[in-house]
Image (spheres, rainbow, N blue to C red):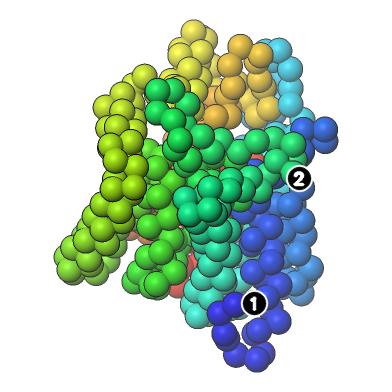
């Protein structure tokens, strides 16, 4: 673990355990319809931060969102489709509760503590990813961390004409999920420190090594954000490009044209990509069939149908639940609550809503907690 002062070492260890548990959203148990580890992580934060008190600003903000959520629940019952999924309703309120807990706990800690917390969890995920990656590509042994625990196979193999290619997932169910969760931690680390340290740099490389569209684009985007907005030193971009080129060259030599074929196929056929269609287009096509009121105000929290999933990504979940007007209200609330932090920062934060990270996920509210704390400290 990363070293810190003796006074904070105990707190850092517990906070690192709590955050690590919060990232384990993919360990979902279908027999109980629940991912228990993120809830356990929230409870650890509750335990270690039980003496802290939330600020008046936070309570006012949460009060507005509670009222907003309650209205959405009433609306969902008026527009009920096939069923009301109670877990989503509970998850939405738990998310707000976790934000209060995490924000009030982290309020008294400085940037060094936050940085070390992020480094610890980034390092843990890099270790699990590296073991999986090296185990397969050196020894030929495929490690699936989820299967023995949840019974669900991780989506390690790329289906189709290309064979013998594994896209490592770490402790997540698919490469894109790894990319967004680890990418979220790396973004926060860069956002807080205003630099890319060795942990973040290796993290960015692992995002690209997932060979997922999300991982490649996200690593490039975070690097571009740092290069053009924070450091404005283009040598870092050059260094990353050189390292990425060397790694890619090794992979191409090892797999001949397999990697090239795979990457070219994914990026040249994004509109035909099944994951992209499921995550965005299918849900929006369904919503377009609904009347104007539903499109403007949504279906309500927890209102679902058997025809298609309405929670395939954070942005789909928000628009399906709250509609266009509700989505604008929710996002605007986050923006103004964070003291109208620079738009580029807020846009980077919102990128993670393009993933499976929804407002029901405690990890979303952890992201927002750190974003809010850093934005507030810069006012």
Q: How many marks?
A: 2
Residue 127 disc label: none
Nearer to the camera, 352 or 84: 352
Residues packed near mark 2 inside 10 Å, few (<14), some (14 to 19) or many (20 plus): few
Percent of width and height locating residue 94: 72, 47
The residue lying at 69 percent from left, 66 percent from top is: 17
Relative side of 153 to 342, left or right: right
The residue lying at 66 percent from left, 70 percent from top is: 15
Nearer to the camera, 80 or 269: 269
Residue 60 visible at all: no
Nearer to the camera, 157 or 50: 157
The residue lying at 38 percent from left, 57 percent from top is: 205
- Residue 341, relative to residue 198: is it above or below? above
| Tag in front: 2 or 1 | 2
- Residue 12, relative to residue 62: is it above or below? below
Judged from this view, the residue extending furthest toward the bottom is 6
Q: Quadrant of the C terminus?
A: bottom left
Relative side of 197 to 101, left or right: left
Distance from label 2 to label 1 (Cα)? Answer: 27 Å
Q: Quadrant of the N terminus?
A: bottom right
Quarter assignment of residue 246: bottom left
Secondary structure under tag 1 reads: helix
Identify residue for label 2.
149
Residues packed near mark 1 inside 10 Å, few (<14), some (14 to 19) or many (20 plus): many
Percent of width and height locating residue 164: 45, 35
The residue lying at 61 percent from left, 11 percent from top is: 307
Identify residue for label 1.
12
Of the image marks 2 and 1, the number of the one nearer the N terminus = 1
Percent of width and height locating residue 38: 70, 52
Relative side of 72 to 292, left or right: right
């Amino acid at each position: 673990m990363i070293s810190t002062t003796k006074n904070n070492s105990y707190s850092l260890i517990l906070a690192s355990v709590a955050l690590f548990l919060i990232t384990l959203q993919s360990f979902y148990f279908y027999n109980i319809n629940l991912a228990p580890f993120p809830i356990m992580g929230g409870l650890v934060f509750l335990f270690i931060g039980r003496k802290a008190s939330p600020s008046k600003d936070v309570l006012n903000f949460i009060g507005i969102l509670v009222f907003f959520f309650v209205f959405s629940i009433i609306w969902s019952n008026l527009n009920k489709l096939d069923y009301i999924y109670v877990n989503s309703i509970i998850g939405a309120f738990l998310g707000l509760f976790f934000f209060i807990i995490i924000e009030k706990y982290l309020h008294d800690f400085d940037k060094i503590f936050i940085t070390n917390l992020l480094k610890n969890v980034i390092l843990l995920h890099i270790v699990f990813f590296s073991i999986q990656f090296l185990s397969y590509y050196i020894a030929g042994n495929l490690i699936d961390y989820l299967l023995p625990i949840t019974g669900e196979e991780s989506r390690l193999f790329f289906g189709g004409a290309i064979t013998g290619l594994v896209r490592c997932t770490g402790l997540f169910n698919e490469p894109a999920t790894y990319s967004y969760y680890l990418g979220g931690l790396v973004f926060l680390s860069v956002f807080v420190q205003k630099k890319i340290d060795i942990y973040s740099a290796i993290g960015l490389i692992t995002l690209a090594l997932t060979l997922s569209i999300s991982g490649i684009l996200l690593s490039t985007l975070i690097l571009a954000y740092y290069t053009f907005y924070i450091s404005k030193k283009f040598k870092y971009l050059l260094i990353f490009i050189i390292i990425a080129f060397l790694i890619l060259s090794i992979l191409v030599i090892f797999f001949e044209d397999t990697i090239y074929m795979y990457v070219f196929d994914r990026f040249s056929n994004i509109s035909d990509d099944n994951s992209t269609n499921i995550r965005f287009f299918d849900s929006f096509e369904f919503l377009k069939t609904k009347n104007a009121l539903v499109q403007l105000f949504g279906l309500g929290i927890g209102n679902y149908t058997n025809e298609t999933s309405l929670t395939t990504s954070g942005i789909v979940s928000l628009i399906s639940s709250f509609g266009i007007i509700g989505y604008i209200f929710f996002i605007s609330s986050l923006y103004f609550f964070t003291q109208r932090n620079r738009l580029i920062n807020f846009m980077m934060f919102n990128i993670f809503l393009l993933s499976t990270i929804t407002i029901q996920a405690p990890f979303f509210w952890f992201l927002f907690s750190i974003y809010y704390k850093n934005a507030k400290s810069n006012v």
